[in-house]
Image: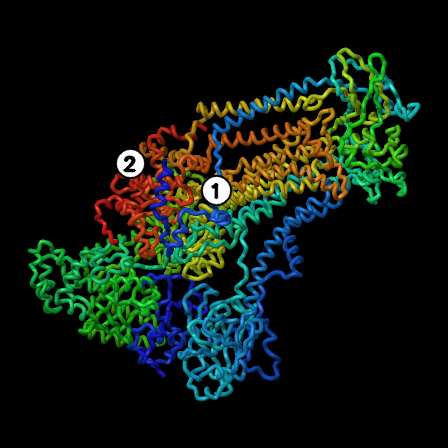
Amino acid sequence: MTSPPGQLPPSRSLRVEVPEEEALQFGVRQEEEAPSAHGPASRKYSPGTMIRDAAAYLGLSRTPRAQTNRVSVNPLMRAAGDAKYNTSRELKAGEAPAEESSGGGVERTRVIYLDPPVSKKPQGSEFVSNRVVTSKYNFITFLPIFLLEMFSRVAYLYFLLQAGLSWWSVISPFSGYGSTAALVFVLAVAGIKAIWEDVKRHHEDKRMNTSATQRLNPDGSVTDILWTDVRVGDVIVVRDGELFPADLMCLYSSLPENVCFIKTTNLDGETNLKIRKPLDLKGLPMNDLASVMSLKLTLTAEDANRNLHKFRGKAHLVHEYFRDMPLSPGGAQRGADTGATLEVPVTMNEMLLRGCMLKNTERIAGMVVYTGKETRIQMNAAKTPLKVGSFDLFLNLQIALVIAMQLAMCLFCAIANYVWIQQEGKKRYYLALDVYVQGNWENAGAQICLTFLTFWILLSYLVPISLFVTLEIVKFIQGFGFVNFDRDMRDPKTREWARCRNSNLNEDLGKIEYIFSDKTGTLTSNEMQLRQIAVKGVAYGTSDLRLEEHLDKTGLRALRLFDQRLYKAAARVQRSSSWNGLITAGGSSKRIMAHPTSYPNLEAVGSLGLDGEAASADGADDEVANSPLPGQAHDWEEGSTALGHHLVDFWTNICLCQSLILEKNPAGGANLFQGPSPDEVALVDGARQIGFEFKERSHSSVRLDMQGEEVLYEVLNVMEYSSDRGCMSVIARAPDGTIRLYCKGSDAKVLQKIRRDTPPELMDNTNANLHYFAKQGLRTLVLGTKIIAPATYQEWDRRYQEAAASFVDRDERLDALGKEIEEGLELIGVTAIEDKLQEGVPAAIQTLLDASIRVWMITGDKQETAVNIAVSCRLVHNPEDVMMLNVDEKSKDTAARDADELLDKFLRRVMQLYKEDTGAEVPAEGKAGPVGSVCALPSEWQKAELAVDGPSLNFILADDSMRHKLAVLAAHCSGVVVSRSSPSQKAAIVKMMTKYEMWKAAGSSRGLTRWYAMHRRRLQGKMLSIGDGANDVAMLQTADVGIGIMGKEGRQAVNNSDYAISQFRFLVPLLLVHGNLSYYRLARLIKYSFYKNITFAFVLFYYQFYAGFSGQALVDSITAAVFNVVFTALPILLFSILDRPVKNLKALVRYPQMYNKRGSHSLTTLTFWKTGVLMGAVHGAVCFFIPYYSLATSGRSNITDVYSLGKVAFVALLGTVTLEVALVARYWTWLFGILTVISYALVYPYLVVFPLLEMAFSYYDPANIGVSDQVLSSATFWFVILVCYIITFGSRYLERTAKWAFKPQDSCILSEKERKDGLMRDLSAPTRKRLSELGVVRMRSKAGLDLERGGDEHSSGETPHLRGQHGSTQFSGEADDEARDTVGSSLDVAGGFDPDMPPPPGQMREWDALSGRSPSMVRFAAHTRSASGTTYPLQR
Amino acid sequence: MPRSEASGDATSVYSFTTEDTATSEELARRRPKKYSFYKRFAYQKLNGWRPVLSPHGAEIFFLAAGVLLLALGVPILIASLNVVEYKVPYAFKGPFESVTDATARQQLLWDAPDADTGLEYSIPVLIDKRMEPPIYVAFELSSFFQNFRRYVRSYDPNRMHDGGSSGSPASACQPFSFLGDNDSLPINPCGQIAANFFNDTFRFLGPGGASLALDDSDIAWPSDANDLYGAVPAENYNPGSAPDLRTGNTSTLLLNQNQHWMVWQRPHSQVAIQKLYGRLDTPLEAGTTLTLVVNNRYNTYGFGGDKTVIITTNSWVGGRNNFLGACYIATGGACLLAALYFLLAYDLGLVWKRPVGDLANMSWLRHAAAESHAQQQFAAAASSSTGAAGRNGTSSGHAAAPAGDGLATATVPAAAAADGSLDPLSKN
């Protein structure tokens, strides 16, 4: 029955990063990475829980209780005990799952038979087919569905109405062709896009549905079938590497251990393997596939739903085998009627979901439970709520306003028409206005209404129909072209491009005000590395050294690299005879261990016995004995034997107090450490490199290799990490019988357990170390060790085992016992681990802050870590001054009040800070009390730093006034860190700030102004969330823009994001380059599209004053239609695709301040009406009145008829709007230039050719035939258009140049500078560093070539300062960017970056200025300065 | 100078990105290379020209534009002024002179003894400037809305081109589509414009009473005669179809031969319509007195419109119209003023002679300068700079604007910021 733990087949390298397993089992997704001090890992799963399932399937759940006593060493085994405990606990909570809800009678279930009763029809038919259709149209349905879709949008419906009306020739000033052609064109473009997208889906569907799989027949044979034909109740055989065609319940696995492995990448993106097990048959042997069919099984399953982590069902098994089955607490229930029936709960552990892939398992058989649309993956495929960009919002309002204007104009004209007819028209007999035919109605109301319609059609050009299709095209290209193909956003390692998923939001990327960032996996890379240690209050190592970059150095050589002092001490002790004693005792003697310092003074050496007595305690210590007495030694430090001893304590602790599992490295070489806590992995990995290697974990022992000497420690007890305990302890017996307790955990928890009489100076030093490390953003753990007397241990262990075996209050009792034994630890040291920030994160954050974007960190990690990371990525600059807003969650009754008091206190402090900072009194407006006056602070003023934790948020978010106070407080903080927050809290914070900003914008206004203020606010300053895990999904969806990181945590975030990038730093180009440009381009596209149409419409409008308000169109309908679609469409389209304020887009990253989220060149209602509408009206006036009055001349060559005037005005108009786009264009690519010129010039051939075409079609149109000949041959025409162009263009040119010269926008100055001497030259050292970290500039290096070739996989951005020491490093813009820039920077290197030269005074100042805030910057500067002296170890 | 260095570098220095496993092939690919158009497009690497709007450019432009406009405008204006034009209003002359009431005038017209010939009277015209042929004779109807939509739209192109054989419904011509609304009697030319064909006639008598030849051939657009209208006889067009109020006959010519009709048929764009009537091919000496003989039939009295005969020469830009010339001269003047403005405002520094491309003028640096100026003042005022000064240096990543770029320290020296001379805001 029992499988002894030792027999675990080593090949079964259990990848235990299966954290989801537990969540799956309990149906509750553990949403947050959570504190874990052994460590502060990204996840909450303790190793025990993680492997629980693995152990459970191994049959360990029936491990006799006695055995758990001593097998707790191996995490796998330990898990077994937990599993049993947890299973029973779970069952207590809710018995057989499917019945749980049957009481309510609400939940629907489905019953699936493996051997359907004969009476039943084929059961698959009652469920949906397995065919999955994601495509929207087919050949027949395309047109109706597509048209329905299009015309369900108000704009298109409006245009349809307009086009329809224009066919009513009596009222329409235009023929129906023009507007219909325009509508058809727009629809055609949208239709082509829709077809293109749908064809892709069709292909995908077809590929899916026609994949083959195998069905197991009742006789045990298999038949190949298509996925489409899979039916519920079928038994499907899936082989290694195949995808599951439907949701299956696993019945059989070919692996001997009766498990199978699946990869759920398609489902949730997680790349690690997960374990599934076949239905628990309680030992019923399943020898081969065919035997599956002999089962009599009925599955009652819950109805299809979208929960990926929970499945509830029960299997009803009938078999003789069960008759004599003993009942175990493990969950099975005997059927009521017969002993041969067994009911087994079915959970997600038995389910194989469609979309997952079978891995490392030869084959499995599973019964189909859900098919097609009802599979979990399809149920989850529901579209994420579609976000619309702010320009959509903006356009809605502006179109409404323009339409209101159109309404007013039409109404005016209609009434004027009626009045004119009554006053003037009726007198003019030749107009025959007394004959009521042909658009002349006797009834005044009818007359006004119908002329209103006439004008409505005439002025319909006010709203540009082409804008909608142009916007779609441009956004598509911006998103799926430029964002997706930006080489600066391509992950250098995974070669993954950025991905735009919702191009609607392109413009919002240019207006981000808040960034809410996840931490783990988003800011950090989730890769921990040991950086520094402190032993007895003295710090060793430097945080700059990366041991992992020196893998060739191991053992003492690595230690020497790490720190010379440690090396000397360790080498000395190792050479001495005390070494052996030290390691067989598991550490130094009690006295040495207790000594507060590693550098004992003379007397202390004697008393510690390091010189003589040590020999007896720890073995002969020749070296120390024979060495000159410390007092005589010229360098006691060098011989600090105590340090060596403490060092052994330190590393032994690290190697023993962990819960890692060894996994064979598939690539050969050293074993890999697998564990839930990356900190632990980092520590043990670091220890291995330094020569203290964790070699093997067996049943109840751990084998270590201590600098070449192998020792076996017997592990007696393991006290798991839990967030409450905040530490982990291991009790081990050393070979010589000493029993020690090794404890490792967070400073807060472990320091409490330290021996009370520890000398205060040691505690002070340790605290200083902790502070020092934390300030560098390192994650710290404190180590403590204690020697336990055997008798004490025996007594304690007895109680401990008792507690472990109990089912009542087990956790509490174990905790209490743990606390008891952990008392009185000896402080050993502190470890400092770097949770390696992702490449370029500090630079990215600095850049974003410079762009005056507020960056908040919202994480589930614990507060200290979060603040530390915030410090290291330069979000928080004064960790000691951070306002820590956390209340004791335990005291629930007072917690809310505490939180409120804290908030008030901090608000007062913020005001105090403001007073100190600016010297100004806090503006006294607003309500009394802190909130009112804080609200009155200028919103740009943000100085304080705030850290909030999740439990406090619980209380704060629940209360309106506290929530408001928090928002006010946070709004004036430059750095905000939210820790231990749940996913819903993450979203709630985003919502809170949105609400706050709205409230702030609305101020005290009311009614319409309030609405408008909020509307305007909604167009500015957007919220952006960025995250990588499923826990960030809520946040991503709540924010205006959600960015998913394509990281290690799967695709959940990406699938719910609007844009996906692979590294945090790519956010910088995404916002600063793409956001900026998209906004710039789209804003101008919108303004210009309206401008040109409004100009056109106003020309038509002005003429009404001279045509009796009759609705006579100056331009014929075809010309009017082609104006929009042909003559003016291309320049602005190309403009909005290609234009840019500066040529070198990297400059937008170099000068992040250019990111102007509320800047002057925002598109606002005011600017829209000024430069879109008003300018259109003015230009329209010029283009109408000048021709109108200039052409009035008698004589032979007159072109005074309506049609000629129309042509002249049209050409004037066309040139005017083309010149406008040409003037606004800041970047003339040949494409834009040529097409702009062509678009305009095309009007002349058009004028000539179009009448010929009309004649060819026997349409004798007085409006065209002969008109252009007359017009073009008239000198007046050419003079008129020339003066029109000079007036419109000249006035705009004057205005723009004056603005450019005297009120320059930043981009204007930049482009001047760019023309003058390039933008990427003269990079100051910090800028250069920042840009290269962001990957925006790349480095060129002569000397670096061999290094790079040598297989260094770390990118240049990571170690710029190292390269800098070669003195030949050159930074440059990209090669093809600008030759001048390149040269500039190389010159600059000679001038500014050469370490031999003192930096120019300006840069000096800059360094000095910076030095106060960013330690790494100072370090950087220091390196560059010291490089000439080569004191810095240059390892290459 | 730097370019040569760059090319020298390019041969000796490898440019690479370390992050990828660079094969030699890729290294080669990465060296200065030419992407395909599509790639350059997708990578946003299309080369382009960056116009910079400089005051000097504007000076040149406005100077050139001003000169050009004046150079064109002055001759245009002179040509227009040199046009000899005589306007002879005749609607209220002759027998109408004594009648003051509009209705009575109308009645007088209708009461004419012969509706077809109307009332003929003559008006002397003194030519006080020599007129060179061709001398154009046109008529003008004031306040005549020929561009009323319903009026313009009342037209059937096919019927006028090929007699309506293509069978178009011609409903647009209503109420002048069918004679007496009888479908079998289509009117051709139909529609309101044709129905109201102007039917006054003019003759000129020279000083001796000899008739001057008024050439009315070739006054319509050639395209109208050749393309627009066919050799279609007028049908049901004569009296009966025309509104009674107008009086007088219409035309019996083929449509494309009736020049006056074709001129009339082209709807004039303005309120006062001018239509060419004929041409005098003999020069008129100064001091000649012409006699204009008008046969007044066309009723404009109902709406008080005047009728004028215009005798004019044409310059190279057409008839008399000073608007265009004036417009040119005014615009040209404005352009010169604009050039002057930049000269004063920029070159002489009256507004701000901003150094080109000086990043110190970037908005955030200006703000920072202003801020630091204010803070310095504050620091000076508050002698105890205990908490504030320290905090300034250490906190807030972006309050200190120069962060991260060398330009800041180089270009906003504290002194400049302090005296505010660099701050353009103070001047604008």
Q: Mark 1 or 2, which is nearer the eye?
A: 1
Q: Could one spot residue A1202 in this view of the protein?
A: yes
* Lateral position of residue A530 relative to residue A471, left or right: left
Q: Where's residue A347, x and y in %? A: 47, 74
Chain letter behind tag 2: A
* Lateral position of residue A903 relative to residue A1206, left or right: left
Residue sitting farthest toward the top: B287
Secondary structure at numbered mark 1: loop
Position of residue A298 relative to residue B218, above or below, is below
Q: Where's residue A143, x and y in %? A: 66, 57
Q: Could one spot residue A899 in this view of the protein?
A: no
Q: Are marks 1 and 2 on the same chain?
A: no
Residue type at mark 2: give it: Pro
* Label 2 packing within 10 angstroms: few (<14), some (14-19), many (20+): few
Where the N terminus of chain A falls, by quadrant? bottom left
* Residue at (72, 27) in percent of width and height: A1197
Q: Where's residue B100, x and y in %? A: 84, 19
* Lateral position of residue A949 relative to residue B137, left or right: left
Q: Which label was assigned to residue A1401?
A: 2
* Label 1 packing within 10 angstroms: few (<14), some (14-19), many (20+): some
Secondary structure at numbered mark 2: helix
Position of residue A1257 relative to residue B371, above or below, is below
Say which residue label 1 marks. B47
Chain letter behind tag 1: B
Residue type at mark 1: give it: Asn
Q: Which label was assigned to residue B71?
A: none
Among the 4 quarters of the image, the one containing residue A234:
bottom right
Position of residue A740 relative to residue B319, above or below, is below
